Amino acid sequence: MRAVLAILLLALAGCGTSRLPPPAPEAPAPITRPHFAGPVSCVPYARAASGIRLAGDAWQWWDAAEGRYARGSTPRPGSVLVIARTARLAQGHLSVVRQVVNSREVLVDHANWGSGAARGRVALDQRVVDVSPRNDWTMVRVWHPPTDQLGVTPFAARGFIHRDIQVASR
């Protein structure tokens, strides 16, 4: 009996390890259309709608995503379009791709785009058009609801942060 118990204890000891496996990456939350009770800026809206868990101002998301989320120049539903900061857009801007219409047009949901009555509000299914010479989404025009047309001013874009979580190689 003691021999069986000793063998059993040795077998169980072989299963133990001092190193725990790395935690599995968290899957992003589903693409949603969150509701906010009051005014909201583009960052918390993009985070809630896409499930991409980044922090900082909109212009900081592109660099913050490096090594954590896939990034690229091709839009996908649920990806976050990062518009660079400029003198006019001091914090940059984020939009969540709702639908890819074609290689040069997407529909996005975003918050706090524009001025006046649009300030702090969520806008759904808004057109964004790639106007870059190489069709690489580095320059975009964004729908301007007050004038019911694409905005005249093009904005520099960094690209799309995708919901794919990057796993560090071992």
Image (tube, rainbow, N blue to C red):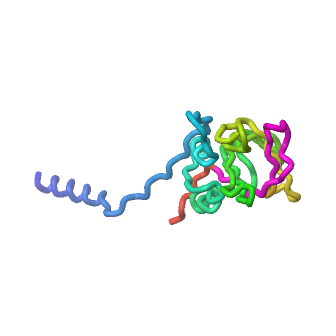
Whether residue 103 is visible: no
Extreme bottom residue here? 170
Magenta span has 32?
no
Give whichever of 56, 166 is nearer the camera: 56
In the displayed structure image, the side of residue 139 where residue 21 appears, left or right = left
Range shown magenta: 140-162
Q: Residue at x 66, y 58 (%)?
A: 59
Q: Residue at x 64, y 54 (%)?
A: 58
What is the x, y in percent for residue 77? 69, 42
Whether residue 115 is visible: yes
Q: Residue at x 62, y 35 (%)?
A: 33
Residue 6 lies, with reference to residue 121, above or below; the image says below
Give whichever of 18, 61 is nearer the camera: 61
What is the x, y in percent for residue 99? 74, 39
What is the x, y in percent for residue 112? 67, 43
Total labels: the figure holds: 0
Give whichever of 63, 27 is nearer the camera: 63
Give whichever of 130, 3 is nearer the camera: 130
What is the x, y in percent for residue 105? 81, 44
- Give the quarter of the image for residue 106: top right
